[in-house]
């Protein structure tokens, strides 16, 4: 059985087959025959256009245009979508400036430099440079992920249908996972120091939480600047009072780790109390 009518040497697709073609009900091989014929037959294309619903046809073209214009998801977006993350959340995460390859490459370069310096020290003493620098990286990453002064995608984030605090937390978690993961890999490259090479973790959490808590009052530029400056000042003061160069700085001792944990918990509580200030208005960071 064929799906065409013969008219001398020329044949055309029957009208009922064209209707089935429009409804998506035409089965192979008739479908393949109709497809091939319509590409070369203006008459059948004209009949097909007359049978088509103009409204549905316009809607179809609009859907096609939207699909063609939609940006292709990157590796990170594809992975998050496969994990079940909502597409609008994925888009906001993908637009986070510090999750771009350029920023991550810069973090990797800095960590490689500090690890190289640590190895050059011959495993003696404490990896002071690495421990001092590692907490600053997540602080800087979170600072660059939120606020109009630093985030070029801020306008898109503002009109996103979600609370500003939720957006901040989503991006903060994403940045922490990325940067702390890189810090962790760098730590594995310093086996000679043992568990001392992990002494950056609690200060990193405390510093990031403190920066976020201050952001609710001071904004996304001044707050992390003060937090980072305070960390550097603390390290300089600790270095000035320690007895010898082989002795770890105070923030990396057991007592210092306990204080860092306490600061992180208190700052996290303060963030929750001030969460409404992360929306637009009322002196919020955005």
Image (cartoon, rainbow, N blue to C red):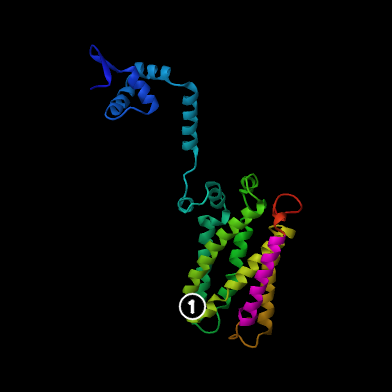
Residue projecting furthest to the right: 282
Q: Nearer the viewer, residue 31 or 147?
A: 31
Q: Nearer the viewer, residue 16 or 202?
A: 16
Secondary element type, mark 1: helix
Which image quadrant: the N terminus? top left
Residue 18 against residue 202 in the figure, above or below = above
Residue 126 against residue 96 in the figure, above or below = below
Determine whether, in the image, residue 148 is placed left or right of residue 82. right
Residue 201 against residue 76 in the figure, above or below = below
Is residue 224 shown to the viewer in this render?
no
Q: Nearer the viewer, residue 32 or 125?
A: 32
Question: Which residue range is magenta in the image?
Answer: 250-273
Residue depicted at 50% across the width and 73% down the height: 187
> Quadrant of the rendered structure where residue 216 is?
bottom right
Q: Position of residue 107 (x, y in %)?
A: 53, 63
Find disc 1 in the rendering and name its residue: 119
């Amino acid at each position: 059985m064929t799906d065409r009518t013969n008219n001398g040497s020329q044949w055309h697709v029957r009208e009922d087959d064209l209707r089935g073609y429009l409804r998506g009900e035409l089965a192979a091989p008739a479908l393949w025959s109709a497809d091939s014929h319509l590409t070369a037959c203006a008459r059948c294309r004209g009949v097909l256009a007359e049978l088509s619903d103009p409204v549905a046809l316009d809607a179809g073209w609009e859907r096609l245009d939207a699909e063609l214009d939609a940006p292709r998801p990157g590796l990170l977006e594809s992975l998050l979508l496969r994990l079940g993350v909502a597409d609008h959340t994925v888009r906001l995460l993908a637009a986070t400036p510090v999750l771009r390859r350029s920023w991550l490459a810069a973090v990797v370069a800095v960590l490689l430099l500090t690890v190289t310096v640590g190895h050059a020290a011959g495993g003696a003493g404490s990896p002071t440079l690495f421990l001092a620098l590692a907490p600053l990286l997540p602080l800087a990453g979170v600072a660059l992920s939120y606020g109009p002064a630093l985030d070029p995608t801020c306008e898109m984030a503002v009109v996103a249908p979600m609370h500003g605090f939720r957006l901040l937390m989503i991006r903060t978690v994403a940045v922490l996972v990325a940067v702390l993961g890189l810090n962790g890999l760098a730590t594995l490259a310093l086996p000679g120091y043992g568990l001392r090479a992990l002494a950056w973790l609690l200060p990193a959490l405390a510093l990031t939480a403190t920066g976020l808590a201050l952001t609710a009052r001071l904004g996304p530029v001044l707050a992390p600047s003060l937090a980072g400056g305070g960390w550097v000042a603390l390290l300089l003061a600790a270095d000035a009072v320690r007895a010898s160069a082989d002795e770890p700085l105070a923030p990396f001792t057991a007592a210092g780790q306990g204080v860092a944990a306490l600061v992180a918990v208190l700052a996290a509580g303060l963030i929750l109390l001030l969460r409404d200030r992360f929306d637009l208005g009322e002196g919020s960071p955005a």
